[in-house]
Amino acid sequence: SPEEYLGRHTYDFIHPEDNEWARNELTKMSEGSSLYKRGIIRYRHKDGSYRMLEGRVTNLLNEPAVGAIVINAKDVTEQILAETAQKTSEENFRQLAENIPEVFWLSSPDWQQTIYVSPAYEKMLKRSRQRVYENIREWSDAMIEEDRERVMQAVQKFIAEAPEGYIFPEYRISLPDGAIRWISARAYPIKNESGVVIRVAGIAEDVTQKRLAEQEIRNALAQK
């Protein structure tokens, strides 16, 4: 919530190993040494984990109309995960993938085989990861019927077009105890040096609380 940031400096939320770099770069820019800077830092999520943020900093201190340093940040955690899966050792990959709250997964290009799914899958879906290794459709079987067709159509579109990044329509899953959760998912193709898709990397998160908050707002507006 915004309240937790009141009275706090943004440096308080940057990973200790990235803090010095961020401070140094902003100090240099405040002294007018650069007009534009780009970098990636680890920023603490509300659950205590760290997300990878790509920051773009523009120095407007010397502009006559605007005297400021403007910072734009984009969450690139999933892209970093995909690159790590392709380029680094299995141990380093697992250390990164298994310490985020979202579900990270890898599949074959045709989505017929699960190559990897992070432990967060079991927490989110309340189902064993082994089952999705044995049958990749285990995750789609968990969707409620009303949402399944449009999501599977989106999967086919992704397979056919292989876009650099794709956001799927949000969908609902049914947990074994009957509870319903809203899920948001994104996918990215991993290509070899020839540009051929060799794997698909994806990330999924539970957005139920966000959905509930949005519904509360709509209900409140409707009562006015």
Image (cartoon, rainbow, N blue to C red):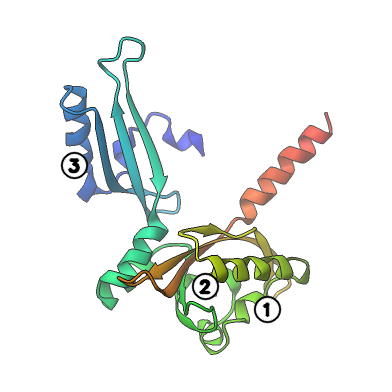
Q: Is residue 66 left or right of residue 32?
A: right
Q: Residues within 10 Å of mark 2 (few under 14, many from 20)?
A: many
Q: What residue appears at the point 76 percent right and 39 percent down from the top-left corner?
A: 218
In front here: 106 or 26?
Answer: 106
| Labelled disc at residue 126 | none
Q: What residue appears at the point 25 percent right and 36 percent down from the top-left corner?
A: 37
The relative height of residue 43 versus residue 109 in the rendered view (above or below) is above
The x, y position of residue 159, in whole percent, is 55, 71
Pointer 3: what residue? 21
**In front: mark 1 or mark 2?**
1
Quarter of the image where one finds residue 213: top right
Q: Residues within 10 Å of mark 1 (few under 14, many from 20)?
A: few
- Looking at the picture, which amino acid does disc 2 mark? Tyr
The relative height of residue 209 versus residue 63 in the rendered view (above or below) is below
Disc 1 to disc 2, C-alpha distance? 14 Å
Instruction: Look at the image and tell me in which quarter the C terminus lies.
Output: top right
Disc 2 to disc 3, C-alpha distance? 34 Å
Q: Specify which label sits upstream in the sequence, 2 or 3.
A: 3
Given the current orientation, which residue lies at the most extreme top position?
Answer: 64
Pointer 1: what residue? 141
Given the current orientation, which residue lies at the most extreme front position?
Answer: 194
Q: Specify which label sits upstream in the sequence, 3 or 1.
A: 3
Q: Specify which label sits upstream in the sequence, 1 or 2.
A: 2
| Labelled disc at residue 121 | 2
Q: Is residue 111 visible to us here?
A: yes
The relative height of residue 37 versus residue 134 in the rendered view (above or below) is above
